[in-house]
Amino acid sequence: MNVQISLARREDFADMIRLADLTLPDRMNLHELKKYLELFPDLIYKATDDGRLIGFSCAGIDMYGETGWLLFSNVAPAYQGKGIGKRLIEARLQALRRFPTLKRVLVTVSETNTASIRALASQGFRFSRQELDYYGPGRHRNIMELSLAPVAIVPRPADQPALI
Ligand SMILES: CC(C)(COP(=O)(O)OP(=O)(O)OC[C@H]1O[C@@H](n2cnc3c(N)ncnc32)[C@H](O)[C@@H]1OP(=O)(O)O)[C@@H](O)C(=O)NCCC(=O)NCCS
């Protein structure tokens, strides 16, 4: 196995849609994918094995440059459970962190998607909130968050000896 993670390109569209139809039928369509690539060309990553597409993932960022979103991710069934999903998360986080104003990264998760939740948790994401009726009456969405807010450092009073 020679898995590489790199930026996806327009030439990958057809393979990406074929894979998305296999891993999450009816979730991703060509129009949505094209929009992601137009809006966020440096945030769409693919995983290849000897050049063959075996996964891809999308991210975006809001117009204020403060909130990044992980938008979609998938790995071909034969390659799942080998750490590729986590590598795709890392690649997107690395790209999002280049925005100096970034404060947080959010992702919508299905509570039954254990693989997704575990992969996200391993990168520091925690359950943030549930948005009631987001998809229509009784259809809620769950959001996980990675907060990048700097931890406040409280200075030690000058007269207090340092602990050794
Ligand atoms: C979600 C998905 C992208 C994860 O990719 P992956 O390459 O299989 O994930 P990884 O191998 O990096 O594993 C991530 C974690 O999930 C766990 N995991 C993987 N497959 C699992 C499964 N079938 N059931 C339970 N846990 C699983 C791994 O053990 C790992 O957890 P750990 O760090 O605690 O050991 C992949 O499963 C997938 O394509 N699923 C279908 C599409 C989908 O649901 N996409 C997400 C919503 S857009």
Image: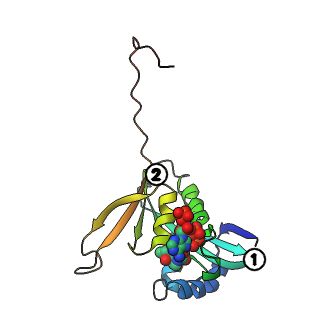
Element under disc 1: loop
Name above or below for residue 39 compared with residue 21.
above
Q: Earlier in the sequence, mark 2 or mark 1?
A: 1
Residue drawn at the location 72% of the way across and 70% of the way down? 3
Measuring from the top left, give residue 116's x and y in whole percent: 48, 70
Indicate the amino acid at tag 2: Leu
What amino acid does circle 1 point to?
A: Gly
Q: Quadrant of ligand 1?
A: bottom right
Q: Residue at point 52% right, 57% down?
A: 123
Check disc 2 and report the residue beneath it: 102
Q: Is residue 76 left or right of residue 112?
A: right
| Residue placed under numbered mark 1 in the picture | 51
Q: Is residue 18 above or below residue 164?
A: below
The quadrant where residue 93 appears: bottom right
**What is the x, y in percent for residue 105?**
44, 58
| Residue drawn at point x = 64 percent, y = 77 percent | 79
Mark 2: which secondary structure? loop
